[in-house]
């Protein structure tokens, strides 16, 4: 298990040198943020980012994300040009030594929350999702959340939502299949493993189709192309937001098929209505058994990348909600501790 940390480049309030001080930190997860979605990432930009990260003794092997243009998800006529660009980006990343590319196929919106600063009993603030609140969101005002690759002005959002009105789950799945058939062979040749991020939360929102929500969806996804290059980002907090999703069992199933290349590990407290708030990583702070999830990763001989996902804001830290230094650093230390314990005590001594 290679511990990593997401860093949003020079504009990130968390400096790389602070990330380096977290014990057991293997590398950085990042992206090229100044190339418009759908265009090719040039080799020199990738190289420059890699050199910067490596100069601090950290590895740069995981991209999160190479965003998929909405026209590919919509199956529009210009998708072949956009997919050719995506293929070239994958080739360029492979040439620069990258290993895993995280992406998602969520229409319009990436991860969605209804509060970015819900106050917890201990005074920390956190990200939360409430079904009632999401129904009240007025999309005519546009929408954007931290960490998203796109933000929308009201007019753009209106026309994009109209375009999706004729896309159901089956159509969206066809478009994903078309995309993967073109991209996975290139990823294989380039030494890159594609790792789709599940829908967050894993249910339909704003009437848009969602196709990476549960065990069935993941099974259909990996069967589209039977190759390790067609893999998953196992996000405990996304999948775990629906109580029927047993995250430990998902790790065992897809991990033993060698399809989990990247894991986002965070804990959430979920209620019966499916509302949730993101908690500290430790198991007894939320609804997920993080020790069981880490043990399952170990049992399937997981040797991919992990990052502590979103943290709360604590100790007066300000910055990008979910992406502060302190709580994510605590998460990394905790997860490394779980891994060390599992590793040490499940070793069969000869
Ligand atoms: C938020 C993040 C997501 C993720 C993308 C991957 O929780 O994990 O924004 O980066 O969905 O494409």
Image (spheres, grey):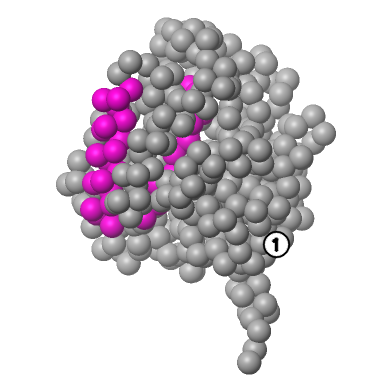
Residue at image coords 17%, 47%: 44
Q: Is 47 placed left or right of 61 in the picture?
A: left
Q: Is 314 placed left or right of 132 in the picture?
A: left
Residue 301: percent from left, percent from top: 57, 67
Vertical placement of residue 31 versus 58, above or below: above
Residue 145: percent from left, percent from top: 50, 29
Image quadrant containing the C terminus: bottom right
Q: Which residues are magenta?
A: 79-108
Vertical placement of residue 173 versus 190, above or below: above
Residue 52 within the segment the image draws in magenta: no
Q: Is 95 placed left or right of 234 in the picture?
A: left
Disc 1 target residue = 291
Q: Secondary structure beneath disc 1? A: helix
Residue 107 within the segment the image draws in magenta: yes
Query: Picture quarter containing residue 160?
Result: top left
Residue at image coords 82%, 34%: 272
Residues 103 and 29: in front is 103
Residue lying furthest left in this view? Answer: 44
Residues 164 and 61: in front is 164
């Amino acid at each position: 298990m290679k511990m990593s940390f997401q860093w949003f480049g020079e504009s990130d309030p968390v400096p790389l040198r602070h990330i380096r001080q977290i014990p057991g930190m293997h590398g950085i997860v990042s992206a090229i943020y100044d190339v418009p979605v759908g265009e090719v990432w040039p080799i020199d930009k990738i190289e420059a980012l890699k050199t910067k990260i490596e100069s601090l003794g950290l590895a740069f092997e995981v991209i999160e994300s190479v965003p998929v243009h909405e026209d590919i998800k919509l199956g529009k006529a210009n998708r072949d040009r956009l997919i050719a660009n995506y293929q070239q980006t994958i080739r360029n990343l492979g040439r620069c030594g990258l290993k895993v590319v995280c992406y998602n196929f969520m229409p319009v919106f990436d991860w969605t929350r209804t509060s970015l600063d819900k106050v917890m009993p201990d005074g920390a603030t956190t990200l939360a999702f409430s079904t009632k609140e999401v129904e009240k969101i007025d999309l005519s005002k546009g929408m954007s959340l931290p960490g998203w690759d796109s933000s929308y002005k009201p007019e753009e959002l209106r026309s994009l939502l109209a375009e999706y009105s004729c896309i159901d789950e089956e159509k969206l799945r066809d478009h994903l299949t078309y995309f993967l058939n073109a991209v996975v062979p290139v990823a294989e040749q380039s030494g890159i493993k594609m790792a789709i991020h599940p829908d967050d939360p894993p249910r339909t929102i704003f009437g848009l189709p969602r196709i990476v929500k549960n065990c069935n969806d993941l099974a259909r996804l990996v069967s589209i192309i039977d190759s390790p290059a067609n893999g998953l980002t196992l996000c405990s907090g996304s999948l775990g937001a629906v109580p029927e999703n047993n995250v430990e069992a998902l790790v065992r199933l897809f991990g033993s098929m060698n399809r989990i290349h990247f894991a986002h590990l965070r804990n959430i407290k979920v209620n019966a209505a499916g509302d949730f708030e993101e908690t500290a990583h430790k198991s007894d702070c939320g609804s997920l058994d993080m020790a069981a999830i880490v043990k399952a990763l170990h049992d399937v001989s997981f040797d991919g990348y992990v990052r502590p996902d979103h943290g709360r804001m604590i100790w007066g830290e300000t910055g990008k909600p979910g992406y502060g230094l302190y709580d994510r650093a605590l998460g990394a230390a905790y997860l490394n501790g779980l891994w060390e314990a599992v590793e040490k005590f499940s070793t069969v001594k000869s």
